Image (cartoon, helix red, strand yellow):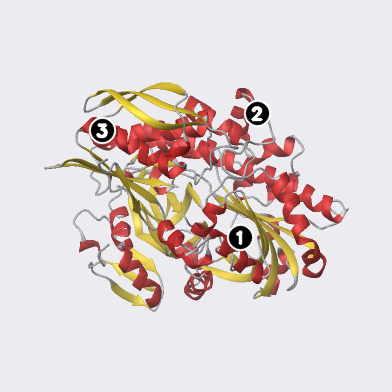
C-alpha cells in the first residue's frame, strides 16, 4: 500500500488535523491523536484516508476523530470516534462494527501473585474447562426462542436473574448491562439462529480471558475506589463481544442501509460507510437491533464472569466473596450511544459512534456509578496477549474534546498473514512461558496471529491519551495466565 | 489447473481475490477461497448437497451477499463446503448447489472464524483473461 500523501497539520505533539478541504465532501475536519512515531505507521497504512472518509457522514459534528490505537479498518478506521446529531445526522452500522459491544470486564480479587502463581496451570485449565471458548463452541446455557428474546431486552440482568452473577455487578457495568430501546422484532431469524447456541461463549480471534497481576499503581485514589490496592494483586480480564449474533445483526442492517443511502440521497466515498438518518425507520431499526446485540454481549460477559468466579472457588477452595472477587467495571468498545454533549457552546443530543474506542466520562457525570462519581469512570484498555493492560479513568477533557471517548487497546500493526509468516504458534507459547505466562488455546493456528509483535505497544498508546488528558492512567497489570478461544 | 483464488493480506483483516474465466466460475471460486480460510479444502468430503438462493441490488452486492450466506451456513448450520455449482446467475440473483459435509471437530481443523464479508474495497473487474473479484472479510 502506498504511503498516504494527504495534508496533515500539526496541532501539537499529539494532535494532527486533516483540513476539511482535503477532500470535497468532508463536512468536518479530521483529528488524529498520535505521537510523531505512531503517525508514521498510520501514514504507511493510509489510515488517515479513512478518517477523512468518515467526515462525509451527514450530521457529523466536531471532528472525525482517531484515537492513537487506530488502524486500518473497513469503512471506519478501528479506533475511530464520530458524533452525529440526532436531529440531522445518520447512524452507520460500520461505525460500530460487526462485533457489536465487543468489550471488556475486569474483576479484582484479594489474591496475591504469590498465592496464584504456584497454581496457575491448574487455574488456567479450570477456566478453560468452565468457560466455553473457541470456534464452534456452544454455550453451557440452553436458551429457547422466548428466552433469547428476553435476553436481548434485559441484557446482563437476564443472567443475574438466573443466578449467574449478582445485582451489584450490574451497578458497575456501562448502561447497567442493558441498553434501552432493544426490540427483538428487528432481529432476523438468521441472527437468532446464529446467536442462540453461542450465548455464554468466549469465541475466538482476538478474544481472551486473562489472569493478571498488578505491576504498577499510578493513581492510588482512583485505584482504591476500584479495589485495586497494590502491586502483586491478582485481577481477571474478560474480553469478548456479541459473537455470531452481533455479526449477523450488522450484516443484515448494512444491507438495509445500502438501499437507504440512495433512498435518502446520501453521498459516501466508501460503500462500507452505509448509513441512514437516525430519525428514519432504517436508522431506528438498526439502533433497536444494535441494542439487542449490545445486551447479548453484556449477558455473555456476565455469564463468563460467573464461571470465572466458580473456577477460582474450585481451585482455591473458598467462595468468591472470601476471595474478594468483585467486578471493577465493564465497558463497551464497539457501540453507538445517544448522549448529550456540548457542541459550539450548545447542549446537543448526538449519536456517538465508538468503533474501537472506550467511553471516558469524568468524575461527577450522572451516568457513572456512585462508587466512581468522585474519581471518574473506569476505562479498561487491554493490550496484546503477552504484554500489559491498563486501567484508567475518564476526564473532563474527554468530554470537551472527544465526546467522552478514549483509546481501546493496542491496535494491530502487522497483518495476520505477516504475523503468521514470521511467527509460529508453538514459539509464541514458549516465548510466553519464558516470561511466566501460561497459555491455553483451542487453536494454536490462531495464536501467531495474536502475538505481541503484531500489535503496537499499548504503553505508547496510553502515554498519548494520558498526556493529551482524554483519560488518566490508574494502574497497569501484566498477564500470568491466558485463555484464548 | 488455473489459479482459483489468492489470499489478500490486510492489517486488521483478510481478503480474498477470486478469479474466473466467466462470472459463474468467479462466484464459485470466491466461495472456495472463503472456505479455504476456514479449513483445509482437501479435508472436506462431498457428502451432502445444499441449495442456496441469494439476491442483491447489483453484482458487487451479490458477491458480498453470497459470501455472507456461506458464512451463515458455516456459523449457524455447521456445514463445510468444498465445491459449488452456480446453477443460475444474473446481476442481482444467484442460485447454487453446494457440496460438502457437516463440520466434525474430530476431523476438521478450523483455522479461524469469519464474522462477515464487507463492502470495503470491494471490486469485480473484467480483463482479457476473465474476471477478478476482491472482497475483504472481517475476522
State whether residue B88 is above or below residue A473. above
* Residue A291 visible (yes or no): no
Rendered image quadrant of residue A328: bottom right
Residue A256 image position (x, y, % from top left): 35, 32
Q: Which residue is mark 2?
A: A143
Viewer-proximal residue among A105 and B77: B77
Please, which chain is the residue tagged with disc 3 on? Answer: B
Residue B128 image position (x, y, % from top left): 11, 42
Of marks 2 and 1, which one's residue comes earlier in the chain? 2
Taking the image as shown, residue A167 lies to the left or right of residue A69, namely right
Whether residues under marks 2 and 1 lie with C-beta atoms below 8 angstroms apart, the answer is: no
Q: Which residue is mark 3?
A: B25
Look at the image and tell me in which quarter the N terminus of chain B lies: top left
Real-space CA distance between mark 2 and mark 3, rounded to the nearest whole angstrom: 40 Å
Task: Specify the label residue B115 is tagged with.
Answer: none
Real-space CA distance between mark 1 and mark 3, rounded to the nearest whole angstrom: 54 Å
**Is disc 1 in the same subunit as disc 3?**
no
Viewer-proximal residue among A391 and A242: A242
**Is disc 2 in the same subunit as disc 1?**
yes
Please, which chain is the residue tagged with disc 2 on? Answer: A
SS state under label 3? helix
Please, which chain is the residue tagged with disc 1 on? Answer: A
Q: Which residue is mark 1?
A: A377
Image depth: mark 2 or mark 1 in front: 2
Amino acid at each position: 500500500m502506498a504511503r498516504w500523501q494527504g495534508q496533515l497539520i500539526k496541532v501539537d505533539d499529539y494532535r494532527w488535523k486533516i483540513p476539511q478541504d482535503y477532500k470535497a465532501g468532508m463536512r468536518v475536519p479530521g483529528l488524529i491523536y498520535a505521537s510523531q512515531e505512531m503517525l508514521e505507521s498510520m501514514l504507511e497504512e493510509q489510515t488517515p484516508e479513512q478518517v477523512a472518509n468518515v467526515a462525509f457522514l451527514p450530521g457529523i459534528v466536531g471532528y472525525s476523530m482517531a484515537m492513537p490505537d487506530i488502524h486500518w479498518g473497513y469503512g471506519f478506521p478501528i479506533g475511530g470516534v464520530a458524533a452525529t446529531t440526532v436531529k440531522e445526522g445518520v447512524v452507520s452500522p460500520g461505525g460500530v462494527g460487526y462485533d457489536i459491544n465487543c468489550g471488556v470486564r475486569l474483576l479484582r480479587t484479594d489474591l496475591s501473585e504469590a498465592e496464584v502463581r504456584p497454581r496457575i496451570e491448574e487455574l488456567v485449565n479450570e477456566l478453560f474447562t468452565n468457560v466455553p471458548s473457541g470456534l464452534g463452541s456452544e454455550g453451557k446455557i440452553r436458551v429457547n426462542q422466548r428466552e433469547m428474546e428476553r435476553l436481548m431486552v434485559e441484557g446482563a440482568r437476564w443472567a443475574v436473574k438466573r443466578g449467574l452473577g449478582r445485582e451489584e455487578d450490574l451497578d458497575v457495568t456501562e448502561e447497567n448491562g442493558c441498553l434501552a430501546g432493544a426490540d427483538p422484532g428487528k432481529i432476523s431469524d438468521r441472527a437468532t439462529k446464529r446467536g442462540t447456541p453461542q450465548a455464554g461463549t468466549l469465541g475466538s480471534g482476538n478474544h481472551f480471558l486473562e489472569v493478571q497481576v498488578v505491576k504498577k499503581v499510578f493513581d492510588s485514589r482512583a485505584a482504591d475506589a476500584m479495589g485495586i490496592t497494590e502491586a502483586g494483586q491478582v485481577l481477571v480480564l474478560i474480553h469478548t463481544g456479541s459473537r455470531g449474533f452481533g455479526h449477523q445483526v450488522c450484516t443484515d442492517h448494512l444491507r438495509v442501509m445500502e438501499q437507504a443511502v440512495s433512498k435518502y440521497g446520501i453521498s459516501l466515498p466508501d460503500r462500507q460507510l452505509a448509513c441512514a438518518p437516525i430519525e428514519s425507520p432504517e436508522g431506528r431499526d438498526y439502533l433497536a437491533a444494535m441494542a439487542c446485540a449490545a445486551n447479548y454481549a453484556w449477558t455473555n460477559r456476565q455469564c463468563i464472569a460467573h464461571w470465572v468466579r466458580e473456577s477460582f472457588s474450585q481451585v482455591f477452595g473458598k467462595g468468591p466473596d472470601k476471595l474478594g472477587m468483585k467486578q471493577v467495571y465493564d465497558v463497551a468498545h464497539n457501540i453507538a450511544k445517544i448522549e448529550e454533549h456540548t457542541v459550539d457552546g450548545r447542549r446537543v443530543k448526538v449519536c456517538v459512534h465508538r468503533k474501537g474506542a472506550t467511553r471516558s466520562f469524568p468524575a461527577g457525570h450522572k451516568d457513572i456509578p456512585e462508587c466512581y462519581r468522585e474519581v471518574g469512570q473506569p476505562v479498561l484498555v487491554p493490550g496484546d496477549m503477552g504484554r500489559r493492560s491498563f486501567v484508567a479513568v475518564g476526564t473532563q477533557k474527554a468530554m470537551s474534546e472527544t465526546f467522552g471517548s478514549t483509546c481501546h487497546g493496542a491496535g494491530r500493526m502487522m497483518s495476520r498473514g505477516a504475523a503468521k509468516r514470521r511467527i509460529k504458534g508453538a514459539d509464541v507459547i514458549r516465548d510466553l512461558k519464558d516470561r511466566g505466562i501460561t497459555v491455553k488455546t483451542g487453536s494454536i493456528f490462531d495464536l501467531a496471529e495474536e502475538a505481541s509483535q503484531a500489535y503496537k505497544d499499548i504503553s505508547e498508546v496510553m502515554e498519548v491519551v494520558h498526556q493529551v488528558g482524554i483519560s488518566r492512567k490508574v494502574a497497569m497489570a501484566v498477564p500470568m495466565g491466558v485463555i484464548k478461544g | 489447473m488455473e489459479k482459483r483464488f489468492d489470499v489478500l493480506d490486510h492489517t486488521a483483516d483478510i481478503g480474498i481475490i477470486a478469479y474466473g474465466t466467466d462470472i459463474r466460475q468467479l462466484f464459485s471460486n470466491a466461495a472456495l477461497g472463503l472456505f479455504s480460510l476456514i479449513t483445509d479444502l482437501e479435508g472436506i468430503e462431498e457428502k451432502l448437497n445444499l441449495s442456496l438462493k441469494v439476491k442483491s441490488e447489483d453484482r458487487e452486492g451479490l458477491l458480498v451477499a453470497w459470501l455472507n450466506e456461506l458464512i451463515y451456513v458455516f456459523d449457524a448450520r455447521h456445514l463445510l463446503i468444498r465445491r459449488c455449482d452456480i446453477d443460475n446467475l444474473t446481476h442481482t440473483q444467484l442460485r447454487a448447489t453446494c457440496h460438502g459435509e457437516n463440520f466434525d471437530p474430530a476431523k476438521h481443523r478450523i483455522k479461524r472464524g469469519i464474522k462477515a464479508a464487507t463492502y470495503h474495497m470491494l471490486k469485480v473487474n473484467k480483463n482479457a483473461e476473465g474476471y477478478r473479484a476482491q472482497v475483504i472479510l472481517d475476522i
